[in-house]
Image (cartoon, rainbow, N blue to C red):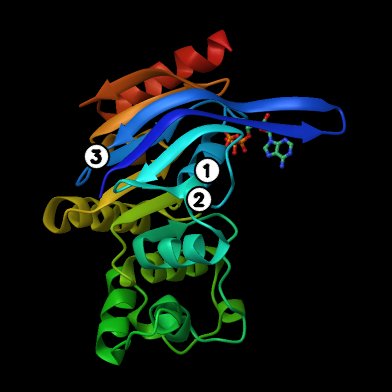
Amino acid sequence: MTVVLHELSKTYEATAGAVTALDGVTVQFPESTFTAIMGPSGSGKSTLLHCSAGLEPSTSGMVTVDGTVLGELGGDALTRFRRDRIGFVFQDLNLVSSLTAAQNVALPVRLAGRRADDTAVTAALAEVGLADRARHRPHELSGGQQQRVAIARALFARPAVVFADEPTGALDKATSGQVLSLMRRLVDEHGRTIVLVTHDPVAAAVADRVLLLVDGRVTEELTGADAAAVSDRMTMLERSC
Ligand SMILES: Nc1ncnc2c1ncn2[C@@H]1O[C@H](COP(=O)(O)OP(=O)(O)OP(=O)(O)O)[C@@H](O)[C@H]1O
């Protein structure tokens, strides 16, 4: 499923004045591709993700997901569309505290009225290294483990598009590598579309391309860059900001 942003802008009206978080972004996330978004703090990365996923309305411009214009869907239709097609892995994880890890993973699928097979739920947790934590509740898990439950949940519903905001930020190197290769496999073997916001050049290097965002605009696109090249580019960018 291809996501297209056309002249997307977002202005926040804050007490201290208006802030332009996105300033006319036009970009495509083609089906079966993995894109990383990088940029200095406050450059609009999270806003871009939220608007692309239909979690926040844009001020102007358009987002289409597989030809559907998100801004033209009403409240319930948008909620259903998001639930059925889009997966999220965000910093505020929104795990349900009264449910076990396994129940949290199965929740979106159950809410969509589908059956969540126990063995498949356990397999999803095993993919993020948490097979032995299926019956634990979020407060019985570390921050990184909760993050991994959120990832297993987002991936279990098999969404066509996954938007992830710093999914590996709280993970150690080994687990982070595991999660990134899982995401890579979803693109290569299952044709998913992944858009990942990250500050980590190693994570960005797993993507097919890296978009650099500065002051709400895409200023550059890197393809085939390894972690060192991404890191060098980011250092130069931050120096010039
Ligand atoms: N709800 C809001 N109200 C007012 N301004 C906001 C709001 N949310 C974000 N902003 C502003 O919009 C700009 C972009 O914010 P955003 O969170 O998208 O940046 P980011 O690149 O994800 O930053 P970081 O890397 O620090 O998470 C910032 O200047 C921020 O202060």
Please determine whether, in this image, residue 241 is positioned above or below residue 153.
Answer: above
Q: Amino acid at mark 3?
A: Pro
Image x and y of residue 161, in percent: 32, 54
Q: Position of residue 183 (x, y in %)?
A: 27, 54
Q: Looking at this rendering, what residue extends furthest in the top direction? A: 240
Which comes sooner in the sequence, label 3 or label 1? 3
Q: What is the tally of numbered marks visible in this picture?
A: 3
In the rendered image, the vertical position of residue 100 relative to residue 51, given as above or below: below
SS at badge 1: helix
Whether residue 199 can be seen here:
no
- Neighbour tally class for label 2: few under 14, some 14-19, many 20 plus, Cα within 10 Å: many
Q: What residue is shown at x 55% (from left), y 41% (from top)?
A: 46
Identify the residue under disc 1.
51
Measure how far apart labels 2 and 3 are at the Cα level: 17 Å
Find numbered disc 3 in the image and state the secondary structure of the residue it sits on.
loop
Instruction: Read off the residue under disc 3.
Output: 30
Q: Residues within 10 Å of mark 1 (few under 14, many from 20)?
A: many
Q: Amino acid at mark 2?
A: Gly
Mark 2 and 1 residues: CB-CB less than 8 Å, in contact? yes
Identify residue type, mark 1: Cys
Q: CA distance from mark 3 to mark 1?
A: 17 Å
**Which comes sooner in the sequence, label 2 or label 3?**
3
Q: Which residue corresponds to the image point at 59% horizontal and 12% vertical from the top-left?
A: 241
Q: Which residue is mark 2?
A: 54
In the image, is 73 to the left or to the right of 229?
right
Asked if 119 appears above or below 105 in the picture, the reply is below
Tell me the SS state at disc 2: loop
Q: Position of residue 117 (x, y in %)?
A: 28, 89
Rendered view: 24 above or below 168: above
CB contact under 8 Å: marks 2 and 3: no
Q: Is residue 24 left or right of residue 229?
A: right
